[in-house]
Amino acid sequence: MKAPRYAWRLLRRDWRAGELQVLAVALLIAVASVASVSFFTDRIGQALVHQASALLGADVVLGASHPPAKSWGELAGRHGLRTAETVSFLSMARAGGRVLLADIKAVSPGYPLRGELRIAPARFAPDHLATTLPAPGTAWADARLVGELGVRVGEVVQVGQSRFTLAAVLSHEPDRGGALFNIAPRLMIARADLAATGLVVPGSRVQYRFLVAGEEAAVRAFRAEVGAQLEAGERLESVEDARPEMRTALSRARQFLGLAALVSVILAGVAIAVATHRFVLRRLDSCAVLRCLGAGQDQILAIYGWQLLWLGLLASGLGVVLGYLAHWALVDVLGALAATTLPPPSPWPVLAGMGVGLVTLFGSALPPLLHLRRVSPLRVLRRDLGAPPLLTRGSYVLGLLVLFALMVWQAGDMTLGMAVLVGMVATVAALALSALGLLSLLRALGRRLHGAWRLGMMNMSRRGASATVQVVAVGLGLMALLLLAVVRVELMAAWAESLPPDAHNRFLVNIQPQQVAALGDFFVARGRERPRFYPMIRGRFVALNSVTVSPESYAGEQARRLVAREFNLSWAAGLKEDNTITAGRWWTGADTGRPLVSVEAGLAKTLGLNLGDEMTFEIAGEPWSATVASLRKVEWDSMQANFFVLAPPGALDGFPATYITSFYLPLEDYDFLGRLVAAFPNVTVIDVAAIIEQVRRVIARVSTALEYVFGFTLLAGLTVLFAALQATLDQRLRETALLRTLGASRRVLQGAMVAEFAAVGALAGGLAATAAALIGAVLAEQVFKFSYQADALLWLAGLGGGALAVVLAGAVGTRGVLQRPPWQTLQRVLAP
């Protein structure tokens, strides 16, 4: 008979006999947990991208110096995407005899496709959500333009040949904050009013932007097709190309959610490995009979391999269905917190659930399953032969590599997967060694104990191998749960603290050197801390190692944009606290005046810069060259003034400079800005409060997601406990029946089991807490870039929670041991 068909019949028979139910339940719950996490995180991940898209005004933006190609609109229409257009250019705005260079933006109906527009009835007044766009003949102006022109809402502003009535003060537009330091004040008009201004003529410097938004799959397809058609001067932007601080927030969001999914994978592997071990031990007699009937080693392996495959397919499929049904509860609860409706899940969670189930099943089951090949036919006659000898380390290494590949794939990050794998292996070794040490100690001290504690500890020492397996399995499960608790509470709190409530939300630019002292005194006189001022010089990157550089020198779109614009250069004697040297050295006092630069590491990677390279900038029409002395990592989400390129003091002397600073201003204290602008009319105020609020929303959504993911991971952890206890159930039934036959009371036996379970749980929990603290510290420092210090409550939760969890799970799993008469138990367990 073919192995697949025989394995199917064997599966049906063993299922009716109850032999595979523990393994099936373990696999079912594990896959359901992973699938529910996958469905949930998939939709949350898509929603986070949509939320981040609000900062771009769309999911994808096509920019060009000419009107959008007709083919772009046709392609978007075929994919069912929504579109809008904006046209931006610099022109003079006039009001009341004053003239000001303004950034005019004409918007079409539907703008913005993502995010929101906010307007206010007066300058610096509280704003509200705009439900319409500027009506024909009207305009919205930002606070800077209103202040510098001296115009009020209801008055007239002239642009080109058209006159517009100022209808509102524009406080926020989603796609405004990308270039904070090279923008003129905004004036927004309707797209239909653009032609009447007479300002857009051949040769005009105009920036056209074609905005696209819709379902993720359709957006991906549109981006792939239109990207292949782009010509010179056309560029494609998405949320991945947005501001550095938002890229950092999204990256951390994906890492947190990836870690949550990774924890579920670990628990699945532990539960399945323990359950499979028991399954293999109960198959030894059957294999011996098959060997006597002429079955070869490969045939036995094929039969039970196919049996596990059938079971894996059924349990994984059902687990995916249950996971899909379970994730709707999360969607219902989280729907009220999301700004938009969560998109439907992609097919990946289904594939992930099935893949995790099968790969985890065989990755965990392969080493013990290979033992069945080595069952001796003599076992039919000699039941005392026990289990076959252990295989070589190669089978365990292979299983470990399979599980590691699964971890990396599930986490989507090699560093994250490696950190957790190393921690898991170290934890397994520590748990095993500690359990063996404790058992040796119990053998020496067992006679000093009394009553139920003595019996419970002696039972543990007598079952050395199984007790070690229990400690390792329970410890891994508790470690995973405690690790997730560390991430959910401690690391999420650290992330939130990296963007504190008083994060700087206002920037002041265009400060003249002679105004620095007076502006600082202005803050101090009004009870505020004197801000730090940073010099800033505008320069264009024109050559690298004496070779001329232009946008066409680079293939990447981001590099082209960087080279096409001017850089904000600065100098500093000391390194800021939110900057870290990653390569090279920071300068000393001896380097004052030397032509050296420190470059932000991300910029260096994009432009292909290395230590020792010579960069040449054109500043005010003059070339200036400097050598790259160091690379820096910049914490852009600190929301403080930072620069891509820094020089030592004295290196840029002789070039005209202005100054920049940042500070925190409560929203209710907007009148402070009015007094500041009145005293320093040339100083430009840039409001980034909306950017900070958007980043906080991303943090809040990830935190909420982890709250619910933790519940599903807890279910997987309980599965580990159940599987670990079931692994010794047969031996425990036999021992309890014999002891009751010899006169032991039910109370003493129950106390002994409680003592044994409490010892296993406390030992596993204490070691798991230590491992979770160590792994959490590594993740915080190396992956999430936070400072982390473990709380003593972690060990209290590990010791107490571990003991309590194992005692409760043991009471449930072994409740039938003491309720069944001894003769029935012996008849069931000792039957041939």
Image: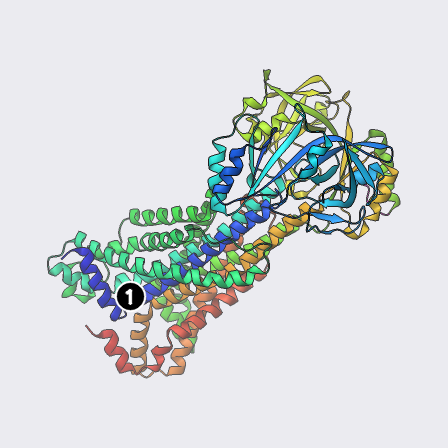
Query: How far across and down, in percent of the image, does residue 304 sit?
Result: 23, 58
- Quick one: label 1, few (<14), some, or many (20+) residues within 10 Å? many
Q: How many marks?
A: 1
The quarter of the image holding the C terminus is bottom left
Image: 460 above or below 217: below
Q: Which quarter of the picture shows residue 608?
A: top right
Q: Is residue 52 visible?
A: yes
Closer to us: 245 or 177:
177
Near-viewer residue (660 or 197): 197
617 lies above or below 110 = above
Q: Name the image colouring.
A: rainbow
In the rendering, at what x and y percent does residue 525 appear? 89, 44
Query: Which residue is painted at 39% across and 67% down in the image?
Result: 722
Tag 1: residue type?
Leu
Give the left or right position of residue 167, taking residue 51 as reference.
Answer: right
State whether the magenta stretch is mostly helix, strand or loop.
loop
Asked if residue 656 is positioned above or below residue 121 in the image, the reply reads above
Q: Is residue 22 left or right of residue 594?
A: left
Q: Position of residue 699 (x, y in %)?
A: 60, 52
- Residue, disc 1: 20
Q: Is residue 530 magenta?
A: yes
Q: Work out whether 595 lies above or below 359.
A: above
Name the quadrant containing residue 638.
top right
Query: Where's residue 776, x and y in %?
Result: 53, 51
- Residue stretch in magenta: 527-531
| Residue at the image position 28 percent from the left and 70 percent from the top | 18
